[in-house]
Image (cartoon, rainbow, N blue to C red):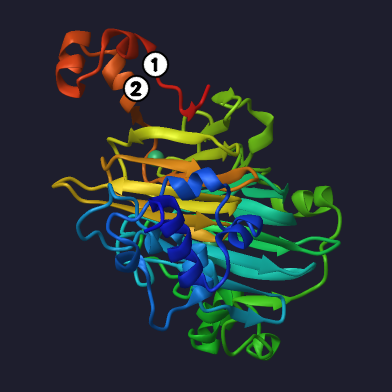
Amino acid sequence: MSDPSEKDTLSRRGFFGVSSGALAAAGIFPSASREDQQPSQYNDRASSTPGPTNTVLDAANPNSVFPPPTDAGGIPPFKYPFAFGHKRLHSGGWSREVTVRELPVSKTLAGVDMRLTAGGIRELHWHTAAEWAMMLYGSARITCIDSAGKSFVTDVKENDLWYFPPGIPHSIQGLAPDGCEFLLVFDDGNFSEFETVLLSDWMAHTPPEVVAKNFGVSEKAIARMPKQELFIFQSEVPGPLEEDRRRAAGSLGPSPIDFAFRTLEIPPAKRNKSGEVRIIDSTNFKIATTIAAAIVTVKPGGVRELHWHPNADEWQYYFGGKGRMTVFATGGRARTMDFETGDVGYVQKTLPHYIENTGTTDLKFLEMFKTDKYQDLALSEWLAHTPPQLVAAHLNLDKATLEALPREKTVLMPE
Ligand code: MN
Ligand code: MN
């Protein structure tokens, strides 16, 4: 018989129909050492898949195909790619969503990925959920009025955020040269982007004589209003920001509330050789009272340390690189899943997890929480602030190892 490492390689070759070397070169297995970390629990034939399989999905999900031996028990999936979503196309852009209907575990938050062309408008609307957003590409003009009726108009670019509370009417429009794409996060897993209060839809479902009376104009003057919703539609790129601001403000003046947040203008809460984390919640983004965020970059070889969140479920959006996450779910159950750009992940409140960069480029993702304040607790800070004899008695560690453990929350390792 050949040695175990060769058997493992043979198994992978049989499985994927190509050599593991080719897979490593393609970045599917980042390095030979990663492969060695994923030995089959059983023998060569036990881990093979001789029947039909989806080789593309298998290659993208090595931790499902070859689960780490520490994985155990049944845990429902906690990943859903936006790429599976129905893309609702319009002349001015598109949208697709990941809600509790696509990903049943994601009960507290839902996400929408939206594209608007230059001049494309997500029409004036509001909804019962709060909306948190991050610009992923390009630039847009956003508008709303606050609860006192005062206007807010600003332009946002890549990495900028906005937050609109429930019932606050707002719009988004793509700017030159190529519009925008952005991620929306709502504080309700059951939210649907297709069930919002739209200006056009409202008018189309109000008797025209009432609309005319409401505005003090003739029925003829409103006869050309849309008979059905616009949702997203193509229009002209708006003019100068200051002009829009002045005209929207009118005699009331602009809103004193800043509904937007310039992420890159705050320093990271943590930065070391393994990456950086920015934390944005109601302490620095005052209006964002129901949704907190951490924007995380993990360098190749780094890991977002073992931790948990005592106060909220975590909804994740991956927007760069590749990684894996194990969620430990009590009762000896644990599952590891692979993530890459465009995936949504989810971790229920208090369940321990880590996120490891398994690729060769920076891993970038959002951690989103339905809460006013970001909170996490790390394994290292827990053990560091527990009597050492007590920790040693549990983990069977010698004194030197115990003293080598990080003394505080590191967030990202290695430091
Ligand atoms: Mn909205
Ligand atoms: Mn987390």
**Few, some or many residues within 10 Å of mark 1 (<14, 14–19, 20+):** some
Q: Residue at x 46, y 71 (%)?
A: 15
Residue labelled with disc 1: 408
Task: In the rendered view, tell whether residue 415 sits above or below residue 237.
Answer: above
Which kind of residue does numbered mark 2 sit on? Answer: Ser
Task: In the rendered view, tell whether residue 368 sits above or below residue 86.
Answer: above
Q: Nearer the viewer, residue 299 or 1?
A: 1
Q: Residue extending furthest front?
A: 1
Which kind of residue does numbered mark 1 sit on? Answer: Glu
Within 8 Å of ligand 2, the CB of disc 2? no
Of pointers 1 and 2, the one earlier in the residue sequence: 2
Q: Quadrant of ligand 2?
A: top left
Q: Position of residue 162 (x, y in %)?
A: 59, 47
Q: Position of residue 6 (x, y in %)?
A: 46, 55
Q: Which mark is residue 106?
A: none
Q: Kindly indicate whether the residue at mark 2 contacts the one at mark 1 (C-beta within 8 angstroms).
A: yes
Residue labelled with disc 2: 380
Give the CA separation, mark 1 to mark 2. Answer: 6 Å
Task: In the rendered view, tell whether residue 293 sits above or below residue 204.
Answer: above
Query: In what element is the residue under mark 2?
Result: helix
Q: Residue at x 22, y 48 (%)?
A: 329
